[in-house]
Amino acid sequence: MKERIHKDIVIIGAGMAGLTAALYCGRMNLDTLVLENGLVGGQIANAVGIENFPGFKSVTGQELISTLQSQAESFGVLVDEFDEIERVTLKTSPKIIETQEKIYETDAVIIATGMNRRKLPLPEEKKFAGRGVHYCELCDGHAYDGKIIAVMGGGNAAVDAANFLTKYTDKLYLIHRSELRADDVSQKRLRANKKIIVMLQTEIKALHGTKRLEEIEIFDKTSGETKNLAVDGIFVNIGVEPNTKLFADELTLTGSGRIPAGEDCRTEIAGVFAAGDVREKEIRQLTTAASDGTTAALLAEKFLSKLKAGD
Ligand SMILES: Cc1cc2nc3c(=O)[nH]c(=O)nc-3n(C[C@H](O)[C@H](O)[C@H](O)COP(=O)(O)OP(=O)(O)OC[C@H]3O[C@@H](n4cnc5c(N)ncnc54)[C@H](O)[C@@H]3O)c2cc1C
C-alpha cells in the first residue's frame, strides 16, 4: 500500500517556472512539494553564458538553478527528483497525484512541466551543442554578431528565427528538407530579406569542426549534390514537444499540445495552474517562466485561503 500524504500545494516540474512558484509558496508558509522527473532546472540546466536574466551579467544555468533551488528549500520546500508521477486526478477534491511510491492529496496544483525542443538528429549534435548548435535564437543569437548562421526548419518558428537573426548577421542560410510551411506573411518577409539564402529540398547530413562547429555537410535532393558549407552556428527549429501527456485526460490542450491558460495562469480546473513554457503563450524565456511561477503561486495561495475560509 502506498503512503497517503497531504500537501497544501504540489508543483509539477522543477524548471525556472516551477522553482520560482516553489520559492513563493515556501515564503507564504504553504506545505509545498515539487516533483521533478528529469533534471532539476529543465531546459536551462546545462546552458552556459545566460546574458539576459536581470541582475546577472552572465550566469550558467547550473548557478542560476542551484541558487534558486536552495532559496526555495530554505523556506521548507521539498524537491523530489526520484519519485516519478504515474497518474494525476485533477477534477476531484482533493486532487490526487500518484507517484511510484506515494499518493499525494492536495487542493492546488501548479503544472510547470515545460517542453523539449526537438534535437538535431545527428550523432555530432552532442559534441557541438552550445558550441555552434543552438535551439533558441532569442537566447543565443547575440553570440553570432557578424558571423555566418544557418537556420534549420521550414515552419513559422524557423522562418521567424531566420528573419530575427539577420539583426546579427549579413549571411544566413535557411535550410529545409522539403518546402516551407510558414505562413505567407513570414515567407514574404523572408524572401524580401537580402541577407537570407533559402535552400529547400536540402538535408543536413553531418556537422564538422574541431572544438566548435565550422562546417555543415548538406545534400541537395534536387541535384543529388553533396557539399560542405562554412557556418559558425546553426539554429535548429524543427519543432517542440510540450510535456503534457500526463494531463491529456484531465485538461483540454491546444493544437500545439500546450495548456490553454491566460496571464493569470488559471486553467479550466479551479485550483490548477499552468506556468512557464507549458502554457500557451507567445514568448518563452526564463523571465516569462519566472513571471508565470510568481503569478501561479500567488493566485494559488489566494485560492487555498478562500477554500479554507469556505468562501
Ligand atoms: C539551450 C537553451 C538555452 C536557452 N537559453 C536561454 C537564455 O539564455 N535566456 C532565456 O531567457 N531563456 C533561454 N532559454 C529558454 C528557457 O530555458 C525556457 O523558456 C525556460 O527554461 C522555461 O522554463 P519552464 O520552467 O517553463 O520549463 P522547463 O525548463 O522545460 O522545465 C520543466 C521541468 O519540468 C520537468 N517535467 C516535465 N514533465 C514532468 C513530469 N511529468 N513530472 C515531473 N517533472 C516533469 C522537466 O524535466 C523540467 O525540469 C533557453 C532554452 C534552451 C533549450
Image (tube, helix red, strand yellow):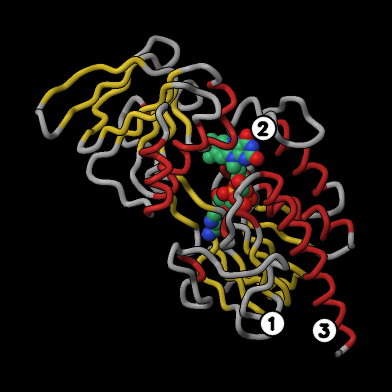
How many angstroms separate mark 2 from mark 1 (CA)?
A: 35 Å
**Can you give x and y, in whole percent of width and height, for residue 91 in the image?**
60, 83
Report the disc number at residue 307: 3
**Can you give x and y, in whole percent of width and height, for residue 139 in the image?**
59, 34
Residue under numbered circle 1: 94
Residue farthest toward the top in the current orientation of the protein: 210
In the image, the residue with mark 1 has its CB under 8 Å from the nearest atom of ligand 1: no
Amino acid marked by disc 2: Gln
Circle 1/circle 3 CB separation < 8 Å: no
Q: Earlier in the sequence, mark 2 or mark 3?
A: 2
Q: Earlier in the sequence, mark 2 or mark 1?
A: 2
**Can you give x and y, in whole percent of width and height, for residue 165 in the image?**
50, 32
- Which quadrant of the figure contains the C terminus? bottom right
Tell me if mark 1 has few (under 14), some (14-19) or many (20+) residues whose alpha carbon lies within 10 angstroms of its own. Answer: some
Q: Residue at x 83, y 70 (%)?
A: 301
Circle 2/circle 3 CB separation < 8 Å: no
In the depicted structure, whether residue 281 falls above or below residue 42: below
